[in-house]
Structures are given as C-alpha cells and as structure tokens.
Amino acid sequence: MSHGRGADRFDLKHVALTMIARALGAPLRVGERGPSIDPRRYHSTHRAPDGAHIGYAAARADAIVVLGAAMRADGRLSSALDERVRAGCSLWHQGAAPVICVTGGGSGQHNEAQAMARRAMALGVPEDALRIEPHARSTAENAQLSAALLGREQRTASIWLVSQPFHLRRARMWFRAAGFAQVHCFSPYPSLQDRHPRKALRWLAREYAALAYAMTRLPTHRRHGTIPKTPYPPHKTEEPT
C-alpha cells in the first residue's frame, strides 16, 4: 500500500508541475504547432509541389529557419536540437518553403549548424536546399546573421521560424527587427516542453529573463540600427530602370 501512495504522490506532483509549466508557457506560445518527422520512418526526399496544400503549415514562405541549441559533449545533437531539426524538415517536406537555413555556432568544439545540416540531410533534405549559418552565438545573432546570409542570395521577406514553444516569442521579436517582413512560427507538438515539465520550468525561468533583457535592448537596436558585423557581404540590389 505504501508503494501505491508513493506512486500517487509522484503522479500528483507530475500533474501539478505540468499545469504550472503550461500556465507559464502559454504567454510565450505563438504560431502553428504540428508533428515532427519520425526519423525511424521518414528518409524520403519527396516534398509537396509548389502550391500544394501544406497541411498544418498554412502559409508558404521564402525559407525555413531552424534555430540552434546546445549540443552534447560528444558532438551529438541534444534532444531539444534534434527536435527542432525534425520539425523544420517536416515543414520542408510539406512544401512550406524551398530552403532550410540552419543557424548556430555553439561555444564548444562542435558546430551546431554543421551538425544540424547533416541531420537534415539524413532526414531527406538535399544539400542544395540547405543554407548553413555557423557563426551565431545568441538568438539576436541567429536573426541578424540569417538575414545577412539569406539576403545575399535573394530577397527573403517571409520565413518559417522553428524552435520549442517557449523560445518563439522572443525569437520572433529579433527576426522582425532583423528585417523579415513576415515571420511565421512553428514548434513541434507535443514538444519536449510539453512532455517534461520539470525541464520546461527551468527553460521558462531562463526565457522570461532573456525576454526581459531583449525588450530592453530592442528599442536601442531599432533607434540606432546597430547590427553586429557579419561574415557575409551585404545584399546588393539592382538600380530601378
């Protein structure tokens, strides 16, 4: 009987943590949610033709941008990062955009964007549909450097932005500040944030602090147009004729 009471207490604690995490996470959720690719079942390079119904991704964009996250010490993708890549590949296979930009430098010896690109190719995205941004060390730099990289090739006005739900409100702020006219947000569902409330509470605590910091920086950024130096040349537009 004591074992049963312990299990009941654990279940109640899990339910309570889940409810708290959902309540705190609700103000940060933006955009669409949908399933990620199951790597055990989906290795096809097939994608929906342009103009086809995109399922849960209601809008077609110029690019999909998948945000980096910390990697494991041995160079493997963390669970959170793998989930983001699978969600971005799911959008690509649905025909939501012609290219995927993976962005993230990382602070260790393993580069996030390079590892993300390898994972995307293993999930059926061809190399010519990938754009690799390997320098960003923050969400603000993800936005600024992705804008520089994508703008080098063509005008990229609209994107699908992919991350966990807790991250997307702040990320969307930075990407709009970087000049993207339309930022559609997409997160996997159910995500790690939904399945692991204890982890979610730690992520949410850090995210609210980061969001407050971003809101103090953005007005200055907009007022002065201060963008860090990037490794990409500026996009040159043709003079009107």
Image: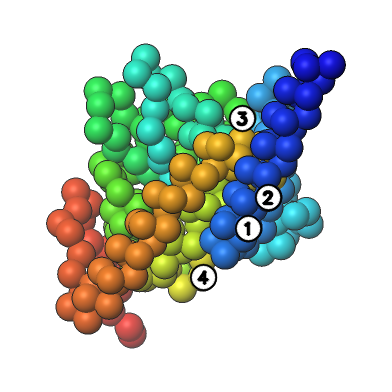
* Occupied quadrant, residue 83: top right
Image position of 214 (left or right of 202): left
The residue most toward the front is: 2
Q: Amino acid under label 3?
A: Gly
Q: For the residues marked 3 and 2, what is the alpha-carbon distance in whole angstroms?
A: 37 Å
The percent coordinates of residue 9 (x first, y second) are 72, 31
Q: What residue type is labelled 2?
A: Met
The type of colouring in the image is: rainbow
Which label is found at residue 23? 1
Distance Cα–Cα, label 2 vs label 1: 6 Å
Is 6 on the left or on the right of 202, as rendered? right
- At x 78%, y 24%, the residue is 5
Which tag, 3 or 2, sits closer to the chain's start? 2
Position above or below: 53 against 132: below
Residue 124 — which label? 3
Residue at point 77%, 15% (across, down) = 3
